[in-house]
Amino acid sequence: MRAAWWPVLIWVALTTGALWFTTTHLSVHSELGDLLPEGTTSTQRVLLTQVRSGLAGRLMILAIEGSHQDELARLSKALGEGLRKNSHIDFVGNGTQALSPEERLALFRSRYLLSRTVSAKTFSTDSLHVALEQRLDDLRSPLAPMTKQYVPSDPTGEFLGILRSWSGWEAPATHRGVWMSADRHRALLVVETKAAGFDADAQEAIQQNIRASFQRVLNELSPSARLLMSGPGVFTVEIQRTIEREVWWLSTVAATLVFLLLYASYRSVTLVLLSLIPLSSGILAGMVAVNSWFGFVHGITLGFGITLLGLVDDYPIHLLSHLNRRDTAQATMRAIWPTMRLGVLTTAIGFSSLLLAGFPALAQLGLFALAGLGTAALVTRWVLPVCVPAGFVPREIRADLLGTMAYLSKVRVLVPVAVVLATIVLIWSDTPLWEEDLAKISPVSEEKKELDQQLRGAMGAPDMRDLLVIEAATQEDLLQRGETVMPKLDRLREAGALAGYDLVSRYLPSQRMQRQRQQDLPEPALLEDRLREAVKGLSFAPGLFAPFLAGIEEARSQSLVDRESFHGTSLGLKIEALMVEHHGRWLAVAPLRGVADRQALKAAVAGWGDVAVAYVDLKEESSRLMREYRDRTLQLLGWGGVAIAVALGIGLKSLPQLWRVLVPIVAGLIVVTGILNLAGESLSLFHVATLLLVIGLGLDYALFLNRPEDQGEERRRTVFGLLVCSTTTILVFGVLAFSKIPVLHAIGLTAACGSLCCLLFAGFLSEQDSHVA
Amino acid sequence: MNFGTIRTSRRLFLFVLLLSGNLAGAAVESTSSHGDPASNTWTVEQVVAALKEGREPSVSFEEAIYSSMLTEPLIVRGTLHFTPPATLEKEVVEPYRERYLIEGDRVTFESERKHVKKTISLEDYPALRSFVEAFRASFTGDVAQLKKVYETTVEGTSRQWTLLLRPHDQVGKSMVDYLLLSGSEGRIATIAIRAPDGDRSVMTLRRGPSR
């Protein structure tokens, strides 16, 4: 007797240790980016880097509406001013900002290095003459006061040309100097956050900051003005909060229902509480294991892991249901342990396939579930029986229960019928089997998505779906490549294949290009001669262009500009966003706007014959990525299934038994898939992961229903236990199926249907006659 | 990214030009009931009221631009149009065709020679906005607003007057040193604008559209 307490003591010690570990070392992450895979191709890796920390994820569009346009303009300006002081925000655009005087000066100094129009021809006598005539035109214009200051030092118009070439995108309409939607009902702002779009906590803090800033600028003139926000960061926060909220109320409802059911089944609060020990120990073990191996536990792993571990709640229920007057709890446990052990081992095989999927999210989940499963089984085996009060017996079980079971076996023909029906559904259904559109899995509400589309449209912002990716070993190589690509993109734009692009080479020329431009600048004496010729017949004051001669002379030997030259300016920000370093290589990511035909563009880019330049459809690429991981997971699952069958064969040592255990599970999986399809659901990775849980449940049910030693009353207890198990599962996951979040809904529906199907099918196929004596 | 300062100031200047030109078209043969013909000295109120009195839809102009960068002035000819309440247009016909149109907050610039047509916002910058608004208001007859923005000096008689406008605030001063309007009764004959760097433009106005 005394020896039996050792496991309990060890359990207490370990639990204490684990509790200490979780309170001091546990680090729960909420950044979705941490769960994304590394990617298998270099393009995918680039994209994932972009998704994790790239500019696209950090951009937020704000809109102010609900007031007169003048008031909206005032609010936009006041809000923009406030936000520019916020240290968590890199950049705020609302139409008012311009280059700072320092930036303008730096650009002006480098005009002969940066201007795309600088070549030897620019400074020929004829070209100079034409340029000077244009300067006279400028002086005639009412706009002259703003441009005339550049005439003496930049008569060829390089500086203003640079600025013109940079303001390439269609800026939104403006009112009172700030961006507005075309109907002037919304003032528009763009905010670039320092934190990655997937960093839910940081994003939430920033968004609260922005709301607070907005509240501060509101006054009595704008009682009804509202602030709208959209962008990846906003979505991240919404997803996170929606999941938290839903999970909280769903789990409250489910826990209450389960508690009531267990109490109704065992009439003892003590036992209901005892039944929680394996599950909670399992969760604790899962957290410790994942945190030790990965260094952190993701919030999502935690949520899904606990879901998967819902399975282990079956173990104490089996024990409690089998308790009787004759045997001690330990003896009862020993009697059902071989069956339970086989169930645990085979389920573990199924879960371990997650570990190999090569997807961090699934690997964490697999480890969590494995550690939890093992711990829960061990705790049920060695700790729980010792804690059960001596002499406890569950309520009397109705005798006609077995009759019902016997009836089930008479209609076992329903199993093949259901499988055939499900197969027909799967073959002829209009609902695609697999979900290819990631957006449909997203829990972001339709209104939010629509708002995002509207705001992006109004801003003329690229939707970051179409990208041109250029790869090179060094910055210089990258910029040189960019320079060869740029004219090709220009041709595509002129042909209408795309509306615009933003490539780093537009802003930063390669060193080679800059040196070339320097060499094209004429020597002072030569330039002076040409200028003297060019100015003939034009009424410019003598000596006016001395600053021009000096500027050229200076530019011939000035130091070249590079990525660092504009650091800390809005231009620098843009350059840093458009070219990134990734594992020692350099990448240019150029967003394309208004792509007319994606297939044609892909073919056109491929036709350039440069392997380092690729067109990427982000949406297509991310779908492909998910598809690859899903296929890989399915493949592993298949091998896991084979391994489970082998393990079962060895454990059961009987082919008919193996048949009775395996068929209900396989049939269950097919029928569940059919039901989901019939309900209009296409399968995603989340469904696949939940099917693992269904396999685990099916194994548990079928193994217990086919225990060779079950006779009479013992069998009644088994059936009763399984009914409690299945009802618990259906309650918990049935509640989940009511969730508005697609992922939770998917898991809930799959698991609830799976539990029901597996129990029914196992009942249909179990060997009844020999037992009903 | 938006490199907007240049445009802003341009716009402002453009606005100044257009508005003043337009008002010129305003009153050609206004027999003003304002002012006292006996004393023959005019006040700002009287000038503004006379200018507002009768408007002509268009008036032709010849503009001479003097700059320290030039050895001789540049000449531009064209027509100014005004459509109440707030649409103004400067149409250049010589030496080449160009059009500047202000409708409310929008400025459309169209040039035949430069092959450009673009629309920009009149106001881009908070500091300048108030200045422009005040200026606009002043020429629609709001003398109080005009005096708020400019120091106004009227000299001469109703038959031969000059109105000198000097901006009060720093932002305005950086744009224009002074505007000098000269005219007779409700009709403007010339508008001279002097920039802080000493460059000037002098616009002479004649009745009716240019050929």
Image (spheres, rainbow, N blue to C red):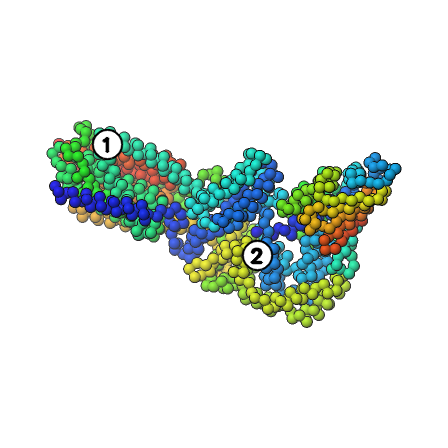
Q: Alpha-carbon neighbours of circle 2 within 10 Å: few (<14), some, or many (≥20)?
A: some
> In screen coordinates, is A673 left or right of A229?
left
Nearest-to-viewer mark from 1 and 2 = 1
Marks 1,2: beta carbons within 8 A: no
Could you classify mark 1 by the number of other residues whose Cα lies within 10 Å: few (under 14), some (14-19), or many (20 or more)? some
- Looking at the image, residue A450 sits to the left or right of residue A324; the answer is right
Quarter holding residue A104: bottom right
Circle 2 is placed at which residue position? Answer: A490
Q: Is residue B169 visible?
A: yes
Residue indicated by mark 1: A269
Q: Earlier in the sequence, mark 1 or mark 2?
A: 1
Of helix, strand and loop, which one carries label 2?
helix
Residue A236: x and y in percent read: 43, 44
Q: CA distance from mark 1 to mark 2?
A: 75 Å
Q: Is residue A339 above or below residue A159?
A: above
Chain for numbered disc 1? A
**x 24%, y 44%: residue:** A15
Q: What chain does mark 2 sit on?
A: A
